[in-house]
Image (tube, rainbow, N blue to C red):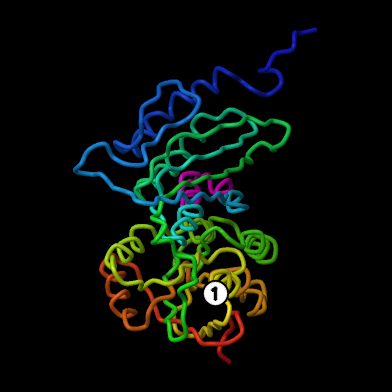
C-alpha cells in the first residue's frame, strides 16, 4: 500500500510553489512608494502617509474604511467561458466602490482565492485581473491567500473574496446625514449586470432560454458570454475627482453603490430620517441586457428592479445647484450620468414616482 502524501490527498506543494512564483511580478504592478518591502513576510506593510514632503498627505484625523465582498456565481460564467481575468476586476470593484461611498481613497487590497486543485495558469489569470482593477483605482495589491481545498470545490469551480482598506479625513466622511430636501439624485451609468443577480441571470439564460455562452444575440450585439462577463465598473477616479473639486463646500451629500437589492434598497441605506427620495423611471437609458433578460425569463418589473442595477451602478445625492457642474465633470472623464430623482421632506424611504 502506497504511503499517504499531501499530493495524494489533492494538494501538490510543488505546483503550489510554482503558482506562488508567478504572483510577485503581478503584485509589483500595483505597488506605490507607500508599500514597504517585506520579503517573505507573513503580512503586508503600507505607510499611511508619504515620507517625502512632495507627496505627503498631512492627515489630521484620518479614518480607516474597511470592506469586503466577492464575485458570486458570475464565476460560473467565467468558468464556462474559460476567461478568468475579468472577474478579478469585479472582485476589486465590489469592494473599492463600497469604500468610495464613505468618500474614502482606497489604499490597499487583499484577495483570497480558493481552488479545488493547484492550477498556476488559472491563478495567474485571476490575479492579473485583480491587479488590473487595482491599477484602475490607484490601489496597491498588498498580498493575499491561495487556498487549495479539494474536498470543498468540484473540479472547475473556485471562489474569490476581496478586502479593501481606504482612508478619509473625519471631516470628509460621507454618510448621508447631510442629505436635505431639494437635493438631486444623480445616477451613474453601469457597465451591465456588474456582479449581482447572476443566480437569476444564469437560470434565465441557460435553463429557460437554453442558450450557450457562445451564442450571438442580435439585441446585445455580443455573445451571451461577453454580455454576462462584462466587468463591474470601478467609479473611484471619476467620483474622487468630483470630491477633490469641492474642498470647501459640502456638495456631495450621499453616495450609494447599487448592488443586490437594486436602486431602492441601496439608496435607502444612506437616506436619513425625515427625508424621502422619489426616483423617476425613464430618466436614463436602460442597457439592452436588462430588457433582454426580462423578456427571456418573463420576469416582473419589480423583480428586475430589486435584483439588478438596471443601468445605474452608483448614485450621488448632491446639492441641486451643483448637479449640472458635477455631471459635466463626470462627462469629461467619460462617465455618463443623469438626474434620476429628487429628495423631499417626508417619511424616510425611497420610492418610484407613479
The image shows residue 127, relative to residue 164, as above or below, that is above
* Residue at point 44%, 51% (across, down): 63
Q: Secondary structure at mark 1?
A: loop
- Image quadrant in which the N terminus is located: top right
- Relative depth, front residue between 239 and 226: 239
Magenta stretch containing residue 80, yes or no?
yes
Instruction: Answer above or below: position of 134 versus 101.
Output: above
Query: In this view, which residue lies farthest toward the right?
Result: 1
Neighbour tally class for label 1: few under 14, some 14-19, many 20 plus, Cα within 10 Å: many
* Of residues 174 and 298, the one drawn nearer to the viewer in this rendering: 174
Could you say where residue 253 lies in the image, as x and y percent from the top left? 43, 72
Total number of numbered discs in the rendering: 1
Q: Residue furthest front?
A: 60
* Most common secondary structure along the magenta stretch: helix
Identify the magenta region: 78-92
Q: Tell me: 187 left or right of 60.
A: right
Image point (67%, 79%), residue name:
300
Nearer-the-camera pick, 33 or 295: 33
Identify the residue at the far left of this view: 54
Between 308 and 353, the residue placed more toward the observer is: 353
Looking at the image, is 3 positioned above or below residue 153?
above
**Image quadrant in which you'd find residue 14:** top right
Residue 191 sits in quarter: bottom left
- Left or right position of 128 against 301: left
Residue that appears at 46% across and 68% down: 255
Query: In x, y percent, where is residue 313?
Result: 48, 67
Task: Report which residue position mark 1 lands on.
Answer: 271
Amino acid at each position: 500500500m502506497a504511503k499517504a502524501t499531501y499530493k495524494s490527498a489533492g494538494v501538490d506543494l510543488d505546483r503550489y510553489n510554482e503558482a506562488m512564483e508567478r504572483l510577485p511580478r503581478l503584485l509589483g504592478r500595483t505597488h506605490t512608494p507607500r508599500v514597504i518591502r517585506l520579503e517573505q513576510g507573513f503580512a503586508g506593510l503600507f505607510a499611511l502617509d508619504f515620507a517625502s514632503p512632495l507627496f505627503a498627505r498631512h492627515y489630521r484625523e484620518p479614518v480607516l474604511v474597511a470592506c469586503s465582498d466577492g464575485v458570486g456565481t458570475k464565476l460560473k460564467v467565467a468558468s464556462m467561458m474559460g476567461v478568468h481575468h475579468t472577474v478579478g476586476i469585479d472582485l476589486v470593484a465590489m469592494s473599492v466602490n463600497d469604500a468610495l461611498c464613505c468618500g474614502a481613497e482606497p489604499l490597499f487590497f487583499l484577495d483570497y482565492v480558493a481552488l479545488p486543485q493547484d492550477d498556476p495558469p488559472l491563478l495567474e489569470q485571476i490575479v492579473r485581473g485583480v491587479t488590473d482593477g487595482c491599477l484602475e483605482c490607484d490601489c496597491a495589491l498588498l498580498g493575499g491567500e491561495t487556498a487549495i481545498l479539494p474536498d470543498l470545490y468540484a473540479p472547475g469551480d473556485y471562489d474569490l473574496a476581496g478586502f479593501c482598506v481606504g482612508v478619509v479625513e473625519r471631516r470628509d466622511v460621507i454618510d448621508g446625514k447631510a442629505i436635505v430636501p431639494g437635493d438631486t439624485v444623480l445616477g451613474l451609468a453601469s457597465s451591465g449586470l456588474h456582479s449581482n443577480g447572476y443566480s437569476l441571470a444564469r437560470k434565465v439564460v441557460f435553463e429557460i432560454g437554453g442558450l450557450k455562452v457562445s451564442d450571438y444575440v442580435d439585441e446585445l450585439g455580443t455573445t451571451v458570454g461577453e454580455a454576462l462577463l462584462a466587468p463591474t465598473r470601478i467609479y473611484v477616479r471619476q467620483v474622487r475627482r468630483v470630491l477633490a473639486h469641492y474642498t470647501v463646500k459640502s456638495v456631495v451629500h450621499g453616495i450609494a453603490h447599487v448592488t443586490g437589492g437594486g436602486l431602492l434598497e441601496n439608496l435607502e441605506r444612506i437616506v436619513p430620517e425625515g427625508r424621502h427620495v422619489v426616483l423617476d423611471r425613464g430618466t436614463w437609458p436602460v442597457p439592452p441586457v436588462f430588457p433582454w433578460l426580462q423578456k427571456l425569463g418573463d420576469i416582473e418589473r419589480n423583480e428586475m428592479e430589486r435584483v439588478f442595477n438596471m443601468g445605474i451602478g452608483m448614485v450621488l445625492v448632491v446639492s441641486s445647484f451643483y448637479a449640472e457642474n458635477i455631471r459635466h465633470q463626470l462627462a469629461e472623464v467619460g462617465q455618463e450620468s443623469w438626474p434620476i430623482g429628487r429628495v423631499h421632506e417626508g417619511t424616510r424611504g425611497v420610492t418610484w414616482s407613479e
